[in-house]
Image (cartoon, grey):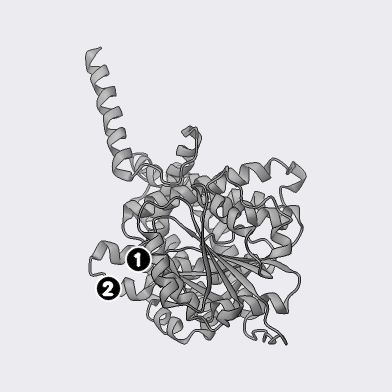
Amino acid sequence: MVYWLQQTILKMGFWLTWALIPIVVEILPAFIQGIRLFLTNLRPKKLAMPDKMPFISIVVPVYNSEDTLFACIQSIRESTYPHELVQVILADNQSTDDSFGVFNRAQNRFADMNMQLMHSEKGKAKALNSAIYNAIGTYIINIDSDGMLEKHALMNMVLRFENDFEVAALTGTILPQHQMIDNWRHPGKSFLQHNEYFEYAQAFLSGRSIESHQNQLFTMSGAFSAFRKEALLKTFLYNTGTIGEDTDMTFQIRDKLHRKVAICAESIFYIVPIESLGSLYIQRQRWQKGEMEVTHEYANKTTMSDFFKNFLVRRMMMDHTFLFPRMIWMFASIALLFLRYSPIMMGMSYVIIYLLYAMVSLLNYMCVFQLLRGSTEERHYYAREWWVAFTLPIYNFICSWIRYIGILNSMTDKKSVWNSKRFGQEAGQVKAIIRSDFSRKRGK
C-alpha cells in the first residue's frame, strides 16, 4: 500500500511540475498585468488640441497592390485630419500589376491630395527608406497598401505625439476588417478569422499597451507605425538585411537612441483577414524568423547580469525557451499513458490549464473592451466576440506549433525569405524522407 501511494505521489508530482510551467510563466503574470492595465485605464488621459496642426507625411510601400491600393488611398482622403496638411508618398518597389493605373485613377478622383508615386528597389525596407528621404512632414507615418485607416486614426496619432514630447515613435492598433470576417461562411476560415481578430485586439490593445507603459514594446507594427522625423533620421533607417525590419527599427529607437516607443491604442488600421491556414503558416513563420534575427543581433550585447532585468531576455524565455515544454506535453501525454499515469488525472490537468488560459482571455477581453471606448462601432462588434475567448487557447496552440517549426526552419535556412514554404510543400518533404528511410531499412 505504501509503495503504490509513493508511486502515485511521485507520478503526480512529475506531471504537476510540467503542468505548473504555463501557470507560473504565463497565466499568473498575465492576470497581474491585465488587472493593472484595467485599473490604469479607468480614467483615460484627455489629449489637448494644439494651436496649429503639423504637416505630416504618409509613406505607403506598394507591391502588386492593384486590388487594395485605391481603398487605402481613399481612407487617407476620408480621414478627419486636414488633407491639405498631408503628403502621401507611394513607394512602388517593382510592382508587376497595374498599381500605377490605380494611382492615376486615385489622382483624378482625389485631385486635392498632395500625392506622388516614386519607384524603388524591390523590398519593403528599401521602399520605405527611399520614401523617407522625400518626406517633408514633422511626423512620418507608414501604412501598408492592403489596409485602411479608421477615419480618426491619423488625428489620434498626431495628438498623441503633440501631447507627449518624450515619445519618438508610435505604433497603431491593427485589426482585421470585421465586415469581411462576417462575409465568410466556411467554418474553417470563420474559426481562423474570428480568432485572428480576437488575437489582434488582445495583442495590441492589451499586450502592447502593457509593454508600452514600461517602454518595453517589442515591435512596432510594420502595417501602421509613426515617427518624429528628427528621431527617424538619427537611426540607420530600416534594416534591409532582415525580414523583421519593423522590430529592428523599434530596437534602434529605444536601445540606440534611448528614446520612448509607445502604442496609440485609439489609432486603428484595418487589414484583410487571414485567408487560410496555409497563409497563417507562412505569416507566423516569417514573424518568428524576423523576431529571431533581430533578437540575435541585440541579445549579443547582453550579459548574464542582465538576465533578470533585461526584458529582451525575458521575452526570449517566454517566446522560445518555454515554447518547447508546450510541445513536449503532447508527446509526453502519450508516453505517460504507457507508464500507467492516470488518464483522468492528466485529462483534468489539461482541462484546468485550458480554463485558466480562457480566463486570461476573458480578463484581456475586458481590458480591450475598456480601451475601445472611443470607437463605438468596433466596440459593439468586439462585444459580440466574447465567445472567442474559449476557442483562443486552441488557436494559440496551433500558432505555437507554427512558431516552433519557424524556429527549426530558421536554424536550417541559409537566407531568410519573405514567404517560406507552404505547409503542403513541407509535409510532402517530410513524407518523402520517411518513405526514403523505410526503403533503406527494408533494403538492409
Quadrant where the image shows the N terminus: top left
Q: Examine the image and state in which quarter residue 134 appears.
A: bottom right
Farthest residue, direction top: 444
Q: Give the image location of residue 274, x and y in percent.
A: 36, 61
Q: Nearer the viewer, residue 215 or 327?
A: 215
Q: Give the image location of residue 46, x and y in percent.
A: 67, 87
Residue 95 visible in the picture? yes
Q: Report which residue position mark 1 lands on.
A: 193
Label 1 neighbour load within 10 Å: few <14, some 14-19, many 20+ = many
Q: Tell which tag, 1 or 2, sits nearer the viewer.
A: 2
Identified at 72% across, 79% down, the residue is: 163
Which secondary structure, mark 2?
helix
Q: Give the image location of residue 131, x and y in percent.
A: 58, 58
Residue 272 visible in the picture? no
Identified at 67% across, 85% down, the residue is: 47
Q: Nearer the viewer, residue 296 or 3?
A: 296
Mark 1 or mark 2: whose residue is earlier in sequence: 2
Q: Report which residue position mark 2 lands on.
A: 183
**Amino acid type, callout 2:** Asn
**Amino acid type, callout 1:** Gln
Q: Is residue 359 left or right of residue 33?
A: left
Q: Nearer the viewer, residue 89 or 252?
A: 89
Number of numbered tags placed on the structure image: 2
Quadrant where the image shows the C terminus: top left
Which secondary structure, mark 1?
helix
Q: CA distance from mark 1 to mark 2?
A: 11 Å
Q: Give the image location of residue 353, x and y in percent.
A: 45, 60
Q: Examine the image and state in which quarter residue 430 appears.
A: top left
